[in-house]
Image: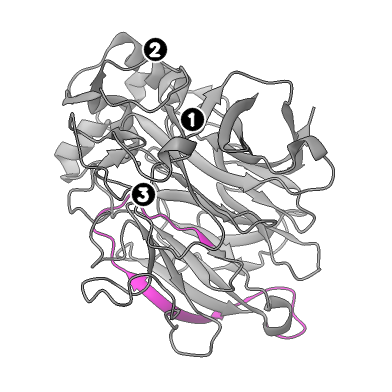
Amino acid sequence: MEQCLPSAMDGEGTKKTPAHYIGRSRWNLEKIHGKKDAFLDRFASKEEKNLPVVGRPLRHRKDVRITDRKEHFGGTRRQAIARHLITLFFPLLVFGCGGSSGASDQGTPLPPTALQIALVTAGSGFAQPVQVTHAGDGSGRTFVVEQAGTVRTLDNAAAPPFLDIRDRVMSGGERGLLSVSFPPGFAQTGRFYVDYTRTPDGATVVSRFVVPGGSAVADSASETVLLTVPQPFANHNGGQLSFGPDGYLYIGMGDGGSGGDPDNNGQNKGTLLGKILRIDVESGQSPYAVPPDNPFLSDNSARGEIWALGLRNPWRFSFDSATGDLYIGDVGQNLYEEIDFQPSGSAGGDNYGWNVMEGTHCYNTVSCDSTGLVLPVAEYDHGQGNCSVTGGMVYRGADFPALQGTYLYGDYCSGKIWGLKRTGAVRESSLLADTPHQISSFGEDEAGNVYVAGYGNGTIYRVTAR
């Protein structure tokens, strides 16, 4: 996600006015700090010509024009900022024209359907929750990651944390403790993995911790650092960790930040930025091994850890627990948010297009070469208060058969939740709920129940079908 203004809202319902942001806006940050903040960027740094009616469903378009108008606000832009520059503390994060293997399967947002969902409070009292997950160890525990550097259990936010590493985490904006992931053998080994931005330089760290035998909490002194990636800017840190069906650890890395990917990291296979990485952390090799079937091992110009490229800021990806398919929520620059897809059994190496494209549209140009790029299976624009996608989960719980196989995802600013489902060769994305929450993450428990994290009010909600 992309977050910028952590104090922009009191609680989760009282939004402050645009005047509150004078001196903190996108272009002023650029002047003061010499870098861009991608979340405000999407509100004011670009103006699109020939854009379809705001908020309408989008199909593949080839006629989008984008021009730089950094100092311009239209009336609707002012209204959007008044409504949605809430605690832009967790903004999330994307691609042009033409297309490849994903184009014909592109999802189209549809009006609300008969299938609707509701959110029921499952836990509260958390501080800026950014992830909900479980360990798969049969304990029934569900964990909540707090951005400042703690991991707590869903059943008791006031209990001593499962992990506390606030002493080494740089938190604020898009930085912080961003993810925790448990390998399949956690119950036997006690080993698990985290992704955070460190003090004092904000570099991304992927490390291992251990839960001592007989203990219910982790030893914060047991850290083994596996990977460190310098970050040129404060935003677009990615941060998702997830073990795939193959037992390897997948790592989401943003493009390094600023705006528009000025260093072209998304398309540069010589850097880990703007990628999804795939490494073997459980083989016993130190600090980790590169799987022998990773797609770019024969390319001397590429980093072997790379599994996929062309990503702007993959804020939450997940594997379908039934099929192994991979879904990626990649946050857009100014105009479009997208859901990318990789089928189970893929050999990897997919290029999702950033910064050649934003969604299915050429980025910052009238035309572009989309040869070899994989287009998203769903996208939406920034109408109706949308600004930043939060990737979600495929529902595989037992309680709501109507939701089976539906990929749930949402928008951080508007609070909308959609369901993406495939019927034959066609995917359709339908609006399932319109909530008041700042959706920072989706997650699930061992039983397959899906949860939504409300970033501003510190509440975790369980998804139910109406």
Where residue 297 appears, as percent x and y from the top left, is 33, 77
Q: In which quadrant of the rendered view does residue 185 lie?
A: bottom right
Relative to 105, 325 lies left or right: right
Q: Marks 2 and 1: CB-CB under 8 Å? A: no
| Distance Cα–Cα, label 3 vs label 2 | 26 Å
Quick one: 122 or 11, which is closer to the camera? 122
Relative to 209, 363 lies left or right: left
Q: Where's the N terminus, which quadrant?
A: top left
The mark that comes first in sequence, 3 or 2, is 2
Q: Which residue is mark 1?
A: 413
Front tag of 3 and 1: 3
The mark that comes first in sequence, 3 or 1, is 3
Q: Is residue 227 magenta?
A: yes
Q: Which residue is mark 3?
A: 352
- Label 1 Cα crowd, 10 Å radius (few <14 / some 14-19 / many 20+): many
What residue do we see at 49% from left, 61% from top?
Answer: 346
Q: Which residue is mark 2?
A: 53
Amino acid under label 2? Val
Where residue 432 appears, as percent x and y from the top left, is 66, 27
Q: Which SS class for mark 3?
A: loop
Q: In this rendering, is residue 437 above or below 318?
A: above
Q: Which SS class for mark 2?
A: loop
Q: Where does the magenta region start and end? A: 212-241
Front tag of 3 and 2: 3
Q: Is residue 119 magenta?
A: no
Q: Marks 3 and 1: CB-CB under 8 Å? A: no
Q: In this rendering, is residue 363 above or below 287?
A: above
- Label 3 Cα crowd, 10 Å radius (few <14 / some 14-19 / many 20+): many
